[in-house]
Image (spheres, rainbow, N blue to C red):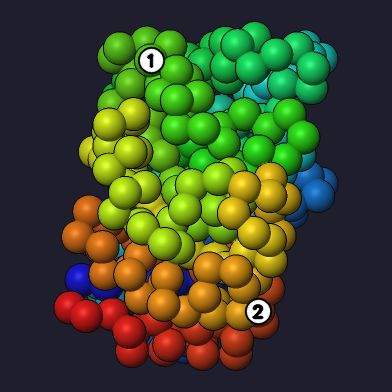
Amino acid sequence: MFYIGCHLSVSGGYENMAKEALSIGANTFQYFTRNPRGSSSKTPSPEDVAAMVSLIRENGFHAPLAHAPYTYNPASKDGHIREYTAEAMGKELRFLESIPDALYNFHPGCHVGQGVDVGIGFIADMLNSIILPDQNTVVLLETMAGKGSEIGSRFEELREIIDRVDEEKRCKVGVCLDTCHVNDAGYDIAADPDAVFTEFDKTVGLDRLRAIHINDSKNPLGAHKDRHEKIGDGTLGLDAFRRIINCGAIKDLPFYLETPCDLEGYAREIALLKSIREV
Ligand code: FE
Ligand code: FE
Ligand code: ZN
C-alpha cells in the first residue's frame, strides 16, 4: 500500500482534516498538535476525534502523524523551557491515546552551546519522563538539517538518544526521516537512497524508521539550511523522488509532504507521486 499524505491544519477540527485528506487523494495526513507558534490550543472534542477515527478506518488510512510545535526544546539550557516542553508533550501524548496507532513526531532540539552530549542527555531524560511503557503512541525523533545547534542531523546522535531511553520504554521510540533535512545534513539521498537507508540501518536500525517527510530542498547537499521546496523543483529533483518512494527498505512507510503548497498544490504532488510509484 502506498500511504501518502501531507501536512494539514487542525484549525477546522479533526474530522475536517480527514475529509480534506480524502478530497486531495491522500490516505494519511500530518498536523501540528497546536499552532506552530506555540500559542495555547483549545482541547479537541472527543466527538470530533471519534468522527475522524471512523472516517480514516472506513477509508483504510494509515494513522495520522501528529507533529509537536517547533517552539518546544527538550534540549534547552533553560530548565523552565525543558519543564514546559516535557509537560506539554506529556499532555499531548496522553491525548493521542484516543487515536489508534498514533505517531507523534518532534524535533529533538537545540543544545544552544551546551554541547551535543548534554543536549542528548536532556532529550533522553524528557522521553523517560513522558513515555509510559504501555502507551500505544510511538514517539518519533525527526532527522534534522543541522542548522545552528540542532541535534539529530547525524544518525549517530539519534541512536545515542534512543540508547539512553529506559529499556522498557524504548519500543515506543522511533524516527521520522525528512528527505530535505537529510540532504541538508549531508546524506546524499538524491543520488543513492539505498546507501542512505543502509547507513541508517547500520546506525539506528530500520525497524525504528516509522515515517518519511517527503520534501525537496532549496539548498545543496550538506548546506545545513532546512528550506523545503516543492517536489521536483529543488536540488533533489523528481528522479530522486522516484527512487526514494520505490525504495524497498521504506516503501511501506507513510509519506508526508511538507512542501510549500496549498491544498490544490498538495493534490497535484500526491497525484504526481502516485504516477511514479511502481507498486
Ligand atoms: Fe518537522
Ligand atoms: Fe519535516
Ligand atoms: Zn524542515
Residue drawn at x 19%, y 60% is: 248
Image location (x, y in percent) of residue 125: 54, 12
Q: Tell me if 75 is positioned left or right of 53 in this view.
A: right
| Left or right: 153, with 94 as reference point | right
| Mark 1 crowdedness (10 Å alpha carbons): few <14, some 14-19, many ≥20 | few
Say which amino acid is labelled 1: Asp
Q: Is residue 85 above or below residue 184?
A: above
Residue 85, given in percent of the width and then of the height, sits at 69, 27
- Tell me the residue that label 1 is attached to: 163
Q: Quadrant of residue 172?
A: top left
Q: Which residue is depicted at the point 45% across and 32% down?
A: 155
Disc 2 marks which amino acid? Cys
Element carrying mark 1:
helix
Mark 2 / mark 1, whichever is N-terminal: 1
Residue under label 2: 261
In the rendered image of this protein, does residue 168 appear above or below residue 105? above
Graded by Cα atoms within 10 Å as few (under 14), some (14 to 19) or many (20 or more), the crowding at tag 2 reads: some
In the image, residue 76 lies at what x, y percent? 75, 20
Q: Position of residue 122 (x, y in %)?
A: 61, 13
Residue 45 visible (yes or no): no
